[in-house]
């Protein structure tokens, strides 16, 4: 990185942060901080949703995921996230908005009781802080590999980025975050387009990618350039495996190829796609960083329209960003520390993106790409920091611990929780540095987040009994924990906890979803279905109740505008995604 590169990074990101600080002075109360005063137009909300969804992990980690999974990983965004946004914007979020709610966890108590509300907060804290940890890790890999920084200098810069994002988030809350996300998305999009064009030239386009993949292995083009192909997981044993070891791996669903000395497990294409779609929908429905933006919209119509620009931008940017991993596989078919020019300590699939930035970006261009990575980091640091602070403040602190204080007290608590959330996430870094980050993320989602998604869906589309959510969550999460631990137990103690078919990580999300839904239905059959899906509880704490009432009065839902346009445009967006996944690239 030259002086010119660093100047580009500082000017592009510094000007946006300075603007965020100025806009933050407009925040005077909790409604401003949590909901931006319910003043955001649909296009700001939509762009902010996209910017929050695409962070530095999506540039670096998702490129690494595509390096390992190929085009099939696109399904998570194209079908999962986009479809989940439409469900959230058209079904779930309007209910919360009309009730004056500030968080998606408030919805769960109103529908299912306080236990589900608290569980939702705990799940989101575990799940979303892991993302901040991934951002810190990807920023380190970028600074260390692409920018040539020493480990100490790289980590110091990572901490500085977190401090800056925390500062303007504490001051301005959602209004600062949403506006800066929209501005940062411009940098992110510019960086994605420019870098895509550069690497596209290096591989000689789509045909060149096919040829380079085929040169490495004749089966790779089929595996990586089509979605509808069964996935193969290949493990190379370090030493000649013993007969008992082979037997254990076979009970885990692997087959041993003696000629190639490798274990192979095959997952059907439909199962992989289903698992990725569920993970994507879970991100949209459970993740309050998305709900928070929609709840800050100025009307229900704006909520529904916001999913359209968010989905369209995500479809295009997904192709730009994730194709980087496939082209990286063509250029570097083998993960070799010497070939990639990285330390053995950081060797994993997530280094591909930083390596390509280092190798293919000239002066000036490298500055734009690194500025885009930093902008993506800022846009998610601030989003998750403000989101989790809101959840902990309203749904745990004000609901259960300190129930009757002033608005200023709770605003201060939310602000000071932001650095706790951001810097507490660094506890994940050692684990993330030792393995591919996307596998860690998908394991967390399948085990903890998918059961919560099932509760949101049944709460919105059925009359499930109020007590059913707790039982469903307990059953779904219990199975998820077993599935999460099973491979580690088998590797460490040669004890297989699940049948071979269920040891495939792709089965975890569908099964936890099915278990949660089934238990909720059984409980409802025993205890009786609710007479309606309406909320049976409003807030009893003075501040919580007053703030909801103020939100309803300050910006009452405007139902006068026709929903035809948002519905038609939303259907067009999901049709584009479906054709790409199950037509063009299947």
Image (cartoon, grey):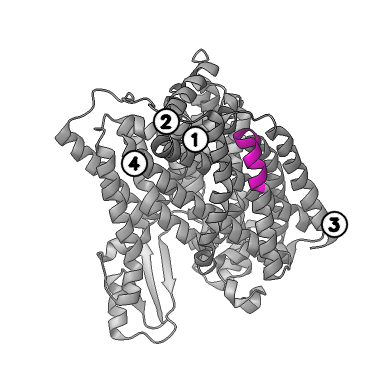
How many callouts does the rendering have?
4
Could you say which is closer to the camera, residue 520 or residue 537?
537
Which residue is tagged 3? Answer: 4
Q: Is residue 195 left or right of residue 433?
A: right
Q: Is residue 94 above or below residue 339?
A: above
Displayed quadrant of residue 523: top left
Could you say which is closer to the camera, residue 497 or residue 264?
497
Could you say which is closer to the camera, residue 198 or residue 420?
420
- Give me the residue at 64% from left, 59% from top: 139
Question: Mark 1 vs mark 2: which is more N-terminal?
Answer: 2
Q: Residues within 10 Å of mark 3 (few under 14, many from 20)?
A: some
Q: CA distance from mark 1 to mark 2?
A: 9 Å
- Give me the residue at 42% from left, 80% from top: 237
Q: Are marks 1 and 2 in contact (CB under 8 Å)?
A: yes
Q: CA distance from mark 1 to mark 3?
A: 39 Å
Question: Mark 3 vs mark 2: which is more N-terminal?
Answer: 3
Which residue is tagged 1? Answer: 291
Question: Mark 2 vs mark 4: which is more N-terminal?
Answer: 2
Instruction: Assign the magenta stretch its main secondary structure.
Output: helix
Q: Residue furthest right?
A: 4
Q: CA distance from mark 3 to mark 2?
A: 47 Å
Q: Residues within 10 Å of mark 1 (few under 14, many from 20)?
A: many
- Give the extent of the magenta segment: 165-176
Q: Residues within 10 Å of mark 2 (few under 14, many from 20)?
A: many
Q: Closer to the observer: label 4 or label 1? A: 1
Q: Residue furthest left?
A: 526
Q: Give the number of the disc on residue 92.
A: 2
Q: Is residue 40 left or right of residue 500?
A: right
Which residue is tagged 4? Answer: 454
Please state the horizontal and vertical placement of residue 395, each as a whole percent of the image.
43, 37
């Amino acid at each position: 990185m030259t002086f010119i590169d660093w100047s580009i990074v500082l000017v592009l990101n510094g000007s946006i942060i300075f603007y965020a600080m100025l806009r933050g002075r407009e925040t005077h109360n909790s409604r401003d901080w949590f909901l931006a005063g319910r003043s955001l137009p649909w296009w700001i909300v939509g762009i902010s949703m996209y910017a929050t969804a695409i962070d530095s992990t999506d540039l670096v980690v998702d490129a690494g995921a595509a390096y390992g999974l190929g085009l099939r990983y696109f399904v998570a965004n194209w079908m999962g996230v986009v479809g989940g946004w439409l469900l959230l914007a058209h079904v779930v979020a309007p209910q919360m908005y009309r009730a004056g709610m500030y968080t998606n966890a408030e919805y769960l108590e109103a529908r299912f009781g306080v236990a589900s509300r608290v569980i939702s907060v705990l799940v989101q804290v575990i799940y979303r802080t892991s993302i901040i940890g991934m951002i810190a890790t990807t920023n380190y890999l970028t600074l260390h590999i692409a920018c040539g920084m020493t480990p100490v200098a790289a980590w110091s810069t990572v901490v500085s980025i977190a401090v800056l994002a925390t500062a303007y988030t504490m001051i301005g809350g959602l209004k600062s975050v949403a506006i800066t996300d929209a501005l940062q998305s411009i940098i992110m999009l510019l960086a994605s387009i420019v870098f895509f064009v550069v690497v596209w030239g290096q591989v000689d386009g789509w045909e060149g990618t096919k040829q380079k993949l085929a040169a490495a292995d004749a089966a790779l083009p089929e595996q990586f350039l089509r979605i509808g192909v069964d996935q193969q997981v290949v493990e190379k044993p370090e030493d000649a495996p013993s007969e008992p070891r082979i037997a254990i791996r076979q009970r885990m669903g692997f087959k041993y190829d003696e000629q190639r000395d490798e274990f192979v497990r095959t997952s059907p294409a439909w199962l992989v796609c289903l698992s990725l779609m569920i993970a994507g929908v879970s991100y949209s429905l459970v993740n309050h960083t998305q709900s928070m933006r929609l709840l800050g919209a100025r009307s229900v119509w704006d909520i529904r329209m916001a999913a359209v620009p968010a989905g369209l931008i995500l479809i295009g940017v997904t192709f730009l960003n994730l194709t980087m991993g496939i082209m990286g596989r063509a250029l570097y078919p083998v993960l070799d520390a010497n070939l990639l020019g990285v330390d053995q300590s950081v060797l994993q699939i997530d280094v591909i993106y930083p390596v390509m930035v280092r190798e293919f970006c000239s002066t000036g261009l490298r500055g734009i790409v690194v500025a885009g990575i930093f902008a993506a980091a800022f846009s998610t640091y601030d989003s998750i920091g403000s989101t989790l602070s809101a959840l902990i403040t309203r749904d745990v602190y004000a609901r259960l611990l300190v129930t009757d204080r002033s608005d200023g007290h709770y605003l201060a608590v939310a602000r000071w929780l932001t650095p706790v959330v951001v810097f507490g996430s660094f506890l994940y870094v050692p684990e993330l540095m030792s393995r591919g980050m996307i596998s860690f993320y998908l394991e967390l989602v399948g085990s903890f987040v998918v059961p919560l998604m099932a509760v949101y869906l049944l709460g919105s589309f059925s009359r499930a009994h109020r007590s059913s959510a707790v039982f469903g969550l307990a059953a779904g999460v219990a199975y998820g924990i077993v599935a999460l631990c099973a491979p580690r137990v088998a590797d460490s103690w040669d004890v297989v906890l699940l049948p071979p078919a269920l040891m495939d990580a792709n089965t975890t999300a569908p099964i936890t979803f099915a278990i949660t839904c089934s238990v909720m239905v059984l409980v409802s059959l025993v205890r009786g279905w609710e007479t309606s899906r309406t909320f049976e509880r409003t807030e009893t704490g003075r501040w919580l109740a007053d703030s909801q009432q103020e939100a309803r009065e300050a910006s009452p839902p405007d139902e006068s505008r026709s929903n035809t346009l948002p519905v038609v445009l939303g259907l067009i967006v999901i049709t584009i995604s479906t054709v790409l996944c199950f037509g063009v690239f299947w």
